[in-house]
Image (spheres, rainbow, N blue to C red):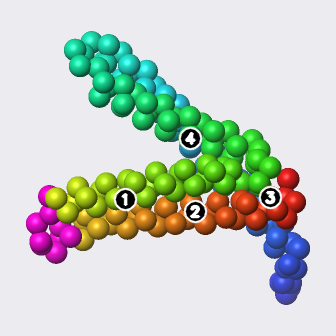
Amino acid sequence: MARRELTAAEKSAIRAKVDAVFARLIGVVAGLIGIAAMALAGWASYKVYLLEHRAPGFVLIAVFLVIGVFFLLVGWRLLLNRPNRYGSVLSPVGWRVLGILFAVVGIGLFAFFVGTMTLTLDTISTTAVPVIASAIFSYWCFRSASRARANAGAGAL
């Protein structure tokens, strides 16, 4: 019995179903990360209350809260398949803010690594990876922002 070749419409339907399953799986994982970050914020607030100098602790709590809210929002949208009016997980402004955050992290890591670097090959290779990854993620975020804006202009609601 000969196997027939799938049509383009059948391939597209299969791909859409697989993408939906993976999106929901990623949504669950993102939601769990968000819940964990919120729990860490609660734990950190309890520990900060006991400290004499509380300002650095409040920064840590704010970081955990921002990460938690971001992952809960992304998890919610992916799990329930609720894209925004741009047909994206984030708005163009959200993608740009995330891209700026990755760029700032990359620049900070670069400055830290340059200040503490010894010129051995293994040190350079292991410290360059996070800096390059931050740059790539920043680029992807800005590219996603332009795609989201193009989707809104094309009428993808």
Is residue 23 in view?
A: no
Q: In this picture, is 38 found above or below 145? A: above
Disc 1 from disc 2: Cα separation: 15 Å
Numbered mark located on residue 142 in the image: 2
Q: Say what secondary structure mark 4 lies in.
A: helix
Q: Distance between the residues labelled 3 and 2?
A: 16 Å
Q: Which of marks 4 and 3 is nearer the N terminus?
A: 4
User: Which of the two discs, 1 and 4, labels the residue nearer the N terminus?
Assistant: 4
Q: Is mark 1 on a helix, strand or loop?
A: helix
**In this orientation, which residue lies closer to the viewer: 133 or 18?**
133
Q: Nearer the viewer, mark 1 or mark 4?
A: 1
Mark 4 is surrounded, within 10 Å at the Cα level, by few (under 14), some (14 to 19) or many (20 or more) other residues, namely: many
What residue is pinned by disc 1? 106
Res 150 → quadrant: bottom right
Q: Disc 3 or 1, which lies upstream in sequence? A: 1
> Would residue 50 be counted in the magenta stretch?
no
Which percent across, then down, holds residue 129? 33, 66
Q: Looking at the image, tell me whether mark 1 or mark 2 is earlier in sequence order.
A: 1
